[in-house]
Amino acid sequence: MEFPANGATIGPMATDKDTKHGKQPNISKKLKKVEKHIARIDSMDDVVDRMTAAARVSEHLNAVFTQPPAQRLIFRKNETHLTDIDAGTTPGFHGTKEECQRFLDLSALEIERYQQLMYANGTRGAMRRVLIILQGMDASGKGGIVKHVFSQVNPMGIHYHGFGAPTEEDKQHDYLWRVRNELPKPGWIAIFDRSQYEDIVMPHVYGTLPEDVWMRRYDEINDFEQNLVASGCAVLKFYLVSSKQAQKEHFLGRLEDPRKFWKFDPSDLEARARWDDYMTAWQDVFEKTSTSWAPWYLIPSDHRWYSRMVVSELLRNTMMNFNMTWPSLDVNREEVIKKLEQ
């Protein structure tokens, strides 16, 4: 079976049907196996052996899912409907929150390994890089993903940018100008909290631009992303599917905790009142911009630990599938060592 380019290509796995009939994988056992493999990697001297072992670790991490997220959560045109997704489910994963946290910790170690490899290659002119786009309604957990998935990576090589309303300077240029300014450099991972898609959804919902203007942007963004991918940039697009009830609980939590007052904006209530309009607008976005080179993944996110787990899984496999090797030394090693010993 083949999966999208941004996902893992791994062997057959158990299905949810198998799980219902008592064949649920022993997740804790699988995670212990991962821990042992990671410990062995650190004792290996041969670079090729280490990379082969790292790929094996990722395969073991993949196995905690009964179905790969790259297959289960990808948007399928004319089949996937945003309003039919149950935000409180954890498709393909039947473990506990605690097991999920163990998975995140182990996956983060491998993400760090591949990030260092990608960064090293970037310094030598390689164009591999990753753009992560996080979208979702207010309080869907976008910020938490940034905090938890990237908790162990090296800040050097990570670029985060949150897009708000366009500034006056932004308005002096085309809508993609501010997006281009924040794209990842070679070897880097860039994380967008909201993105160019706001420039379609907002005028769609609020009527701030003529329809023919924002409708043209579907094709423009598809071309923009296709060019990015062709140049060596993987584009991972995640929409965090949350329920109105979960959003309400998070808003109330912000209003009850003085440390979170700053997170609440009255405009959030206006967007909440237009929930159905937003769902319609986003469905159109998925139908028109989920492409073979940059598909959308719709992740149920009322259980935030699950959405973090899925993003970690897809990012790790994306970088693993770059099949990178460590750059070679571009000087005479023996001569350098001899000079250092003088």
Image (tube, rainbow, N blue to C red):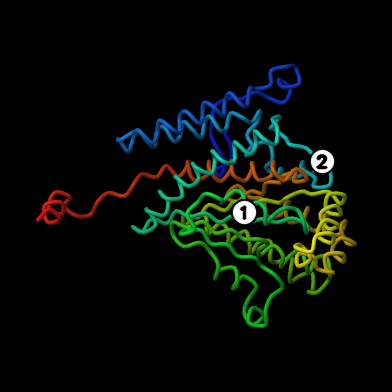
Quadrant for the C terminus, please. Answer: bottom left
Q: Residues within 10 Å of mark 2 (few under 14, many from 20)?
A: some
**SS category of the residue bearing label 1:** helix
Task: State the image quarter where residue 127 is shown.
Answer: bottom left
71 displayed left or right of 86: left
Q: Which quarter of the image is occupied by the N terminus?
A: top right
Q: Residue at x 60, y 47 (%)?
A: 292
Q: Which amino acid, mark 1?
A: Lys
Q: Earlier in the sequence, mark 2 or mark 1?
A: 2
Q: Residues within 10 Å of mark 1 (few under 14, many from 20)?
A: few
Q: Residue at (59%, 44%) from the top-left corner?
A: 312
Depth order, front residue of 93/281 = 93
**Corner quadrant of residue 305:** top right
Q: Nearer the viewer, mark 2 or mark 1?
A: 1
Left or right: 125 in relation to 36:
left
Mark 1, residue position: 147
- Percent coordinates x, y for residue 95 in the rendering: 69, 30
Q: Position of residue 28 (x, y in %)?
A: 61, 26
Q: Is residue 177 above or below residue 242?
A: below
> Residue 131: where, in percent of width, then height?
56, 56
Check the image and name the residue furthest to the top: 22
Specify the label residue 253 is tagged with: none
Q: In the rendered structure, which amino acid carries the disc numbered 2?
A: Asp
Q: In the rendered view, tell whether residue 323 sits above or below residue 286.
A: above
* Secondary element at tag 2: loop
In the image, taking residue 116 as reference, residue 73 lies left or right, namely right
Tell me if residue 18 comes above or below residue 299 in the rendering: above
